Image (cartoon, rainbow, N blue to C red):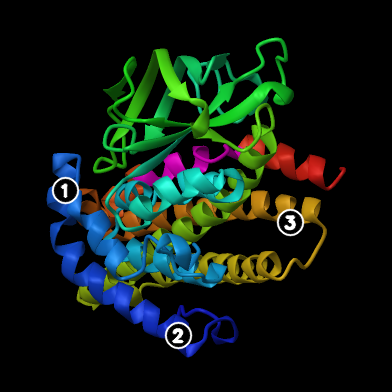
Amino acid sequence: MLNLQPNPIYYSSEHEQFRKTVREFVAREITPFINEWDEAETFPRALYRQSAEIGIIGIGYPEEYGGTPADGFYSIIVADELSRAGSGGLIASLLSHSIAAPPILAAGSAELKARVLPAILSGEKIAALAITEPSGGSDVASLKTTAIRDGQCYIVNGEKTFITSGLRADYFTVAVRTNPADKGAGGVSLLLVERDTPGFTRTPLKKMGWWCSDTAHLHFDNCRVSIANLIGEENQGFQTIMLNFNSERLGLAAQAYGLAKVCFEDALAWARERKTFGAPLVERQVIRHKLVDMAMKLEATRATLEDLTSRVENNIGAPNLLVAQTSMLKNFATQTMQFCADQALQILGGMGYIRESRVERIYREVKVLMIGGGAEEIMKDLAAKQMKL
């Protein structure tokens, strides 16, 4: 049997100790309850604090804010081990700070970082990113939500949709148009909006998958937000958003790989256990071929993910090519997840169609990863432009 393992050249003993800690945490605190949480369409808020205590939430952030400086391979480990519970929705909400907090760290003022990051990284507060609008997602330069300066405040009006952790979050990193005269990228800024801001309301959204991840439509009606909550310079938010997208897409690829691997493992276990006509399924050539095809795609995805992570960590390659490679990897990893979920459900048969099966849940969650963070078509076009095709 092919032993699907990470490439040891990228992982130190410290990495592996961290993996062991996260694996034990997931087995103890998440897996026994995940079916219940998914049906309830939520999970306990205390899980953020518990995750922070073992280092999950603060990975990659400076110690001064309560984080743990770490390379990208620690993030791969987090995605891989959390995937063992078989719920992309839990990963999305539990790690929603991983797309909301980086712009604050990268561009926020010293005062803003000191005020909000420690609470986020300790699990006390929850952060969400709000970019997508009803009129568009990946076309950030065309966003319509406005933030008009009025003395020491911005007056925010508009809507955001499909926002992960949109109901429970305390802090929202929001893309706004601070210069209405500029209809393109030059008028875009980032603003931190706090949950209790008057005029800020949220409406829950029902989804095909990611049930335990709360997703919301946000409404801003003359919300007054202090200028101290501006993230970076006014009208200079577009580039920060683009850089954030790159790291988000790498994270989504790691998550897709982890969930695809779960599908392979469950399919293999079932094929060994289930007997048809007197022999285990795994002895049927057609089943073995399905498993080999899954393993082949998984191995290629893992190797590409680890290689690209190393390139990003060490600044190897032109920036435009790293963007192209990240876009292609995001597509490749989600296609691997789609293939493995489909093949695993076919191998499990009726058992794969029953709720509480990890494969059933992952099968429902495939499409959100193929769309979120940049749809396949957007990723291909972006890669083509970066490669000057």
Q: Secondary structure of the magenta portion, mostly?
A: helix
Q: In the rendered view, tell whether residue 349 sits above or below residue 302.
A: above
Mark 3 Cα-neighbour bin, 10 Å: few <14, some 14–19, many ≥20: many
Q: Amino acid at mark 1?
A: Trp
SS at mark 2? helix
Disc 1 to disc 3, how far (Cα)? 37 Å
The answer to whether residue 30 is left or right of residue 73 is: left
The three-letter code of the residue at mark 2 reads Glu
Give the quadrant of residue 47.
bottom left
In the displayed structure, 56 sits above or below 167; it is below
Which tag, 1 or 3, sits closer to the chain's start? 1
Helix, strand or loop under label 3: helix
Q: Which residue is mark 3?
A: 322
Residues in magenta, as a range: 365-376
Residue 120 is covered by the magenta coloring: no
Query: Where is 183 relative to 361, above or below?
Result: above
> Upstream in the sequence, badge 3 or badge 2?
2
Q: Residue at x 43, y 64 (%)?
A: 67
Q: Nearer the viewer, residue 165 or 213?
A: 165
Viewport quadrant of the N terminus: bottom left
**Distance between mark 2 and mark 1 Cα atoms:** 32 Å
Mark 2 or mark 1: whose residue is earlier in sequence? 2
Name the residue tied to disc 2: 14
Residue indicated by mark 1: 37
**Image position, residue 259 (x, y; %):** 39, 59
Amino acid beneath label 3: Leu
Queried whether the magenta region covers residue 369, the answer comes back as yes
Residue at the (35%, 59%) spot, across then down? 344
| Front: mark 2 or 1 | 2
Task: Point out residue 91 in the picture as x, y percentages from the top left corner.
Answer: 35, 53
Q: Do the residues bearing badges 3 and 2 touch, measured as CB atoms within 8 Å?
A: no
